[in-house]
Every structure is written in C-alpha cells, then in structure tokens.
Amino acid sequence: MQLYYSATSPFARKVNMMLHYTGQIENTELVLTNFESDELRRLNPLGKIPALVDGKTTLADSPIICEYLDEHYEQAGNLSVFHCGRGSYYAVQSAHALADGLAQAAVNIVFENKRTTEPSHYWIERWQLAVETAIKNIDLKAIGSASDVNIATLATIAALGYLDFRLGHYPWREWNAPLDNWLESIKNEPWVTVTTPR
C-alpha cells in the first residue's frame, strides 16, 4: 500500500496512527505530498490529503481510508476499531465526526491566516467558535482510551495534536480540563508518539 500524506495534516495523521496501531504500517509506503501535487490530484480530484493506494483500489478522505484499513485488521482476527458494536457505534462515530470537524475548523483558521490578502475576520471568528464548542462537547466516554482504542480515539488525538502544533496559543485545556487529562494518559503510546508532528 501507499499512503500519500503530509506530516502536518491531522487527517493524514489519523490514518498514519491507524496504520501503526493495527500493524499495517509494515506493508505501507509513506509518500510525502502536498496540495499542489499533480499526482495527488490524480488520486483525489479535490487535491485533499490523505490518499491511499492499495493495488487497484484508490481511496481518498480519512474516514473511508480508516474504515478500509479496519476491515483488513478485522479480517486478520482482530477487534474492529471502526465498528464498535451496536451499543456504541453511533456514539463513537459522532465523536469521530466531531473530532474531524474540530480539525477542519483549525485547518481553516491556519489557512485563512496564511492568505496573502486580508484574512476574513468573520470566518476566523466562526471557526474559532467551532473549535471552542467542539472541545467543550467532546464525549470522553465515546473517545476510548489507551486500552480501548476506537476511531474516535485516533481522530481526537489528531485534532488536539494539530491545535498544539499550529494554534498552540489556544487555551483548549482550560475549556476542557478532563480532556487534557485524557490526552496525558494516552500521549506516550508508541502509535501516538511516532506520528506526532515535529
């Protein structure tokens, strides 16, 4: 397999964590790319990172890539990371979607501030509000733990890691102290540390 990724994309990091956690990284070539890459746009017409190539299968967008990897993981006799049982499936997927939305809002802020023209204060404030309200509403019961990893675990770590990396001045730990404790409890897992943006 080949994963087309960026070292700083929270969505690529989520997939990268999935690869490491499930042991599939051993059979995966990491291909560093960027949004301007013609090769990436061939794989994903939207030019979004990440993209996964596995033989004749090409997938773009981190949720479906993670689900694909999870199917292989489950077929190898492991417990699914993505489909977490009838009782918790929708809670986990809702937490997954919230973490992805949090990451997207943070990415939007970073890109808006990089504009060569005057950034839109309206949109920055709107995305900042999305970041804050998302942080305050993360369901700690749904995002798992170091001993009970699910897809929302990975997505939440990726989103929080991106905040620390790109928007380190945001006081998200003050908005949700239990979430900070949760991150402290899991941040030293090997599949977390090896994917941390530098």
Image (cartoon, rainbow, N blue to C red):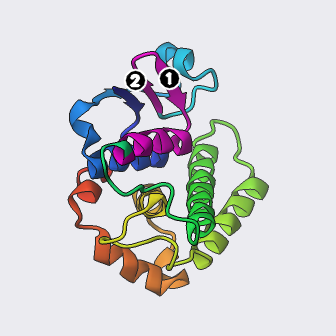
* Relative depth, front residue between 32 and 150: 150
In this view, 165 is above or below 8: below
* Relative depth, front residue between 109 and 73: 73
Q: Residue at x 40, y 36 (%)?
A: 6
Number of numbered callouts drawn: 2
Is residue 10 in the magenta section?
no
Horizontal side of residue 196 vs 54, given as left or right = left
How many residues crowd mark 2 within 10 Å: few (<14), some (14–19), many (20+)? few
In this view, 44 is above or below 95: above
Q: Residue at x 54, y 31 (%)?
A: 60
| Mark 1 element type | strand
In this view, 132 is above or below 100: below
Res. 198 in view = no
Residue 52: x and y in percent read 44, 29
Q: Are marks 1 and 2 in contact (CB under 8 Å)?
A: yes
Horizontal side of residue 77 vs 157, given as left or right = left
Which residue occupies the extreme right position in the image?
A: 122
The stretch of residues the image draws in magenta is: 51-74
Horizontal side of residue 101 vs 155, given as left or right = right
* Relative depth, front residue between 53 and 167: 53
Is residue 70 in the magenta section?
yes
Q: Which mark is residue 12?
A: none
Which residue is labeled 2 in the image?
54
Which residue is labeled 1 in the image?
58
Q: CA distance from mark 1 to mark 2?
A: 6 Å
Q: Amino acid at mark 1?
A: Thr
Q: Amino acid at mark 2?
A: Asp
